Image (cartoon, rainbow, N blue to C red):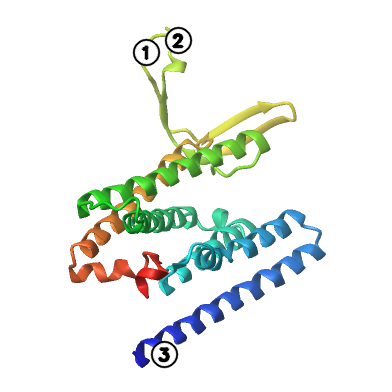
Amino acid sequence: MKRNKKRASSSGRRRSVLHIILVVLVVLIMVARLLRRDYHAVFLCVLTLLLFNIPLFVDRRFRVTIPRELEIVILLFIFAAEILGEIGSFYTYISWWDTMLHTVNGFLMAAIGFALVDFLNDHPKLHFSLSPVFVAFFAFCFSMTVGVVWEFFEFAMDALTATDMQKDVLVPAFSSVLLNPDGINTPIRIDGITETVISHAGGTTVITGGYLDIGIVDTIKDMIVNCIGAVVFSVIGYFYLIGRNRGIFAAKFIPQLKEKTE
């Protein structure tokens, strides 16, 4: 018992140290951006500081124990997405940055899906027994639903506020029935695209390297990697439910009700 208390205390200190380090970094970045009058970056920093408090809010408001590993991943995920990705332009400089974050998101949301089923099962008025296969499938579906809703949000933001959350991709070839001169439903293939010329109100913009795809490729890629992350955790979670040793890893990422852990 004493060993467990020491371990819990040690993990709490590690969480606090990480939280403090990240908060200090965000505050320093916010001050630097404020001096440069980059108010958009300042807003992102404030948003990041608020998001950092999600684990604490869930812990106190809903009496849910957030595993140390899950909390660490959540904090690093928020920092990587908002500070490094948006302010640091990692989305532009590192081609796989957005892909990595969407994969992690699929993994985390599947863990949340497992926790939701567990919470409902422990509710006195909603107690039911589900097979491990169904719970794993629910977690997968929950993760994919969150991923789809997020893509809806990205599309809405791009359409309404002229942002570029759905990152554009240059493609060397595509097929389209719109280019068929006969107007029939037979696609015309365009290969070996070297540049795209866009005529607009401000003049002409020439893009070298291919055809500018605005969001479709990025959206589908995000859904695919979200699916991979969801499948990975759903499989791990399945073994966790049936009591196999390989499921021990899942327990580090599934929140638990405080009454149950106590």
Q: Give residue 86's quadrant in the image.
A: bottom right
Residue in the image at 21% along x and 55% along y: 132
Looking at the rendered structure, the secondary structure element under dot 1 is loop
Residue 134: which numbered mark, if any? none
**Badge 3 density bin: few <14, some 14–19, many ≥20, Cα 10 Å:** few
Badge 2 amino acid: Pro
Where does label 3 land, which residue?
6
Where does label 1 land, which residue?
185
Badge 1 amino acid: Asn
Q: Given this view, does label 1 or label 3 mark the residue nearer the observer?
A: 3
Tags 2 and 1 in contact by the CB under 8 Å rule?
no
Q: Is residue 231 left or right of residue 95?
A: left
Q: Is residue 90 left or right of residue 116?
A: right
Tell me where residue 150 appears, x and y as whole percent. Answer: 50, 44
Residue in the image at 60% along x and 42% along y: 164
The CA distance from mark 2 to mark 1 is 11 Å
Q: Is residue 133 above or below residue 260?
A: above
Looking at the rendered structure, the secondary structure element under dot 2 is loop
Q: Nearer the viewer, residue 134 or 193?
A: 134
Tell me where residue 77 appears, x and y as whole percent. Answer: 50, 63
Badge 3 amino acid: Lys
Where does label 2 land, which residue?
181
